[in-house]
Amino acid sequence: MSTPARIFVFDTTLRDGEQAPGFSMDVPAKLAVARALDTLGVDILEAGFPIASPADAEAVRQVAAEIKRPVIAALARTRRQDIEEAARSLEPAARSRIHTFLATSDLHLKAKLRMTREECLASAVDAVTLARQFTDDVEFSAEDATRSDREFLCRVIEAVIRAGCTTVNLPDTVGYATPDEHREFFVEIIERVPNSDKAIFSAHCHNDLGLAVANSLAAIQGGVRQVECSVNGIGERAGNASLEELVMALRVRQDRLPYDTGINSPALFAASQLLSEVTSEPVQANKAIVGRNSFAHEAGIHQDGMLKDVRTYEIMRPESVGQSVSSRLVLGRHSGRHAVQSRCEALGFTLSHEEVDQVYHAVISLGEHRKAIADNDLRRIVERVRTPATANGGAPTPQPEAVGYGHGV
Ligand code: MN
């Protein structure tokens, strides 16, 4: 098998993510997240938008001063003062990237920027030329690229590459694309732009329709070699493509997606938890990869399968993303005998067949009132079952089935 193509992970947790309501972070919080991103192994770390505020500029400067392995990127509009401020904030960086952006869709040009297409083209070229005076790593983003006129977009891309742009990012700013469409979009653009081989193409997908990860994967199949994403998928509105989902989709489905990233996947869960902690925003329980339920099984049929062979209900190991192995089988109303017995054994109790039955029924009935049964609850139940029958409080009659009910599919 040939070596999988390398995909560069451009993390925007501290920029697009941080600008979402409820996710703003002070400088120490940003530094803590930047360290976690470094541990994760992101290739490019977008640290902020320096012109936006002095605190933004300071955060970029401190991240650039401390974090030396990844390329540190700073965002700038195409204005001179934006680019100069970005360059100043990036001065301490070992490797820096100026990321300049301008909308290219007629809607944004007319309604928001009040600019003609020709003014847009000139402004983009000037910005890239200026940015190249500070660093030879310059990214240009054509905001609202997916809703831009193709012919015009191709002209802009060709011109910015000629001006020295090394990464061309084409965002689906409003999260409107579908996967097949997004793949075709990149195939067409890369084919039509005569100097497209001189730059790396990049996707930046938003999750308004829940398609950000699917669209990013499709973009990779369309020739993109950089994906912009964020931890926990945070970002404007419904967020950006989730870093952990993208990375694990590529890793788990190597057979269909022969690409790889430099991400140290066992560090994913810790990064997710840290971000949740510093922003006080919880991670959705059923969030893929990093949610607390993403490797938890409560249904009896699933628990029985898991105890026999984890591959029955798991496509990746929890430890491969840094989730703990111990709490995967959750005891509750939907649990089965097999899981109850297994947890009792883990707690040091060897139970008779009859005791297992009694404990199992006590777990089910306690589960009616509780979200989950903790180990201490289980210890108490076992002790109660083991006291003389008269003090047993009348355990329900044992049922003959081997596993509990709960969702089979
Ligand atoms: Mn964005």
Image (spheres, helix red, strand yellow):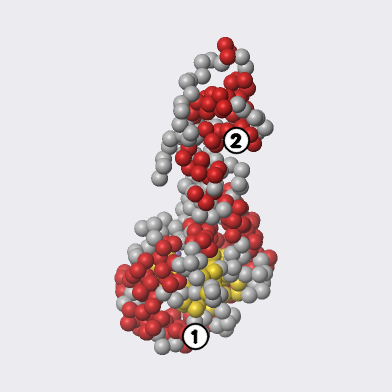
Q: What secondary structure is marked by label 2? A: helix
- Mark 2 crowd level (few <14, some 14–19, many ≥20, 10 Å Cα): some
Q: Which sits earlier in the primary sequence, circle 1 or circle 2? A: 1
Quarter of the image for residue 342 reads: top right
- Mark 1 crowd level (few <14, some 14–19, many ≥20, 10 Å Cα): some
Q: Nearer the viewer, residue 120 or 297?
A: 297
The residue carrying mark 2 is 343
Quarter containing ligand 1? bottom left
Q: Is residue 146 visible?
A: yes
The residue carrying mark 1 is 198
Q: Residue at x 59, y 21 (%)?
A: 385
Q: Residue at x 39, y 60 (%)?
A: 211
Q: Nearer the viewer, residue 240 or 392?
A: 392
208 displayed left or right of 371: left
Q: Nearer the viewer, mark 1 or mark 2?
A: 2
Q: Amino acid at mark 2?
A: Arg
Alpha carbon distance from label 1 to label 2: 58 Å
Q: Residue at x 40, y 45 (%)?
A: 409
Q: What secondary structure is marked by label 1? A: helix
Q: Nearer the viewer, residue 323 or 65?
A: 323
54 displayed left or right of 22: right
Q: Position of residue 359 (x, y in %)?
A: 55, 26
Q: Amino acid at mark 1?
A: Lys
From the viewer's perspective, is residue 334 above or below residue 80?
Answer: above
Q: Is residue 272 visible?
A: no
Quarter of the image for residue 132 reads: bottom right
Q: Position of residue 386 (x, y in %)?
A: 62, 20
Q: Residue at x 35, y 83 (%)?
A: 118
From the viewer's perspective, is residue 71 above or below residue 162?
Answer: above
Q: Position of residue 283 (x, y in %)?
A: 51, 48
